[in-house]
Amino acid sequence: MPRYFFHYRTEEKLIRDEAGSDHADLDAAEQTAAEMGRAIIEKVAGEGGEMDAPRSIEITDAAGHDLLYVVFWAGPKVGDGPATPIEPATVH
């Protein structure tokens, strides 16, 4: 199975994934990145963090080649509940 690396980017910094993880293919890695994005937004919302700032998970292969960017942010807050993550958009 190929190893993919999931680097987390905000407007201020890039947090590199030094370990990576194995996935059957890029589609499976993209699904993992989308789940990571959803979890990050839920954590940021729970901590009262900035919800409008775009974030991304940048997927690379073991050689460091860029394969896919999964960009995500929270949608506008409606009502009294927490902000709702928007489905991630991908750039192939």
Image: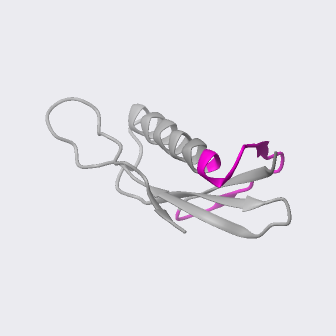
- Can residue 17 be seen at all in this image of the molecule? no
Of 29 and 49, nearer the camera is 29
- Coordinates of residue 17 in the picture (x, y in percent): 76, 50
The image quadrant where one finds the N terminus is top right
Of 44 and 5, nearer the camera is 5
- Coordinates of residue 80 in the picture (x, y in percent): 17, 30
- Can residue 69 be seen at all in this image of the molecule? yes
Q: Is residue 82 magenta?
A: no
Residue shown at 82%/50% (left/top)? 18
Quarter of the image for residue 79 reads top left
Examine the rendered structure and indicate whether residue 54 appears above or below residue 22: below
Q: Is residue 23 magenta?
A: yes
Residue shown at 84%/59% (left/top)? 62
Of 8 and 88, nearer the camera is 88
42 left or right of 26 in image: left
Residue shown at 65%/54% (left/top)? 26
- Coordinates of residue 24 in the picture (x, y in percent): 72, 44
Q: Tell me the magenta residue range.
A: 11-29
Examine the rendered structure and indicate whether residue 22 appears above or below residue 61: above
The image quadrant where one finds the C terminus is bottom right
- Coordinates of residue 52 in the picture (x, y in percent): 34, 56
71 left or right of 32 in image: left
User: How many numbered discs sit on the rendered protein?
Assistant: 0
Residue shown at 43%/35% (left/top)? 42
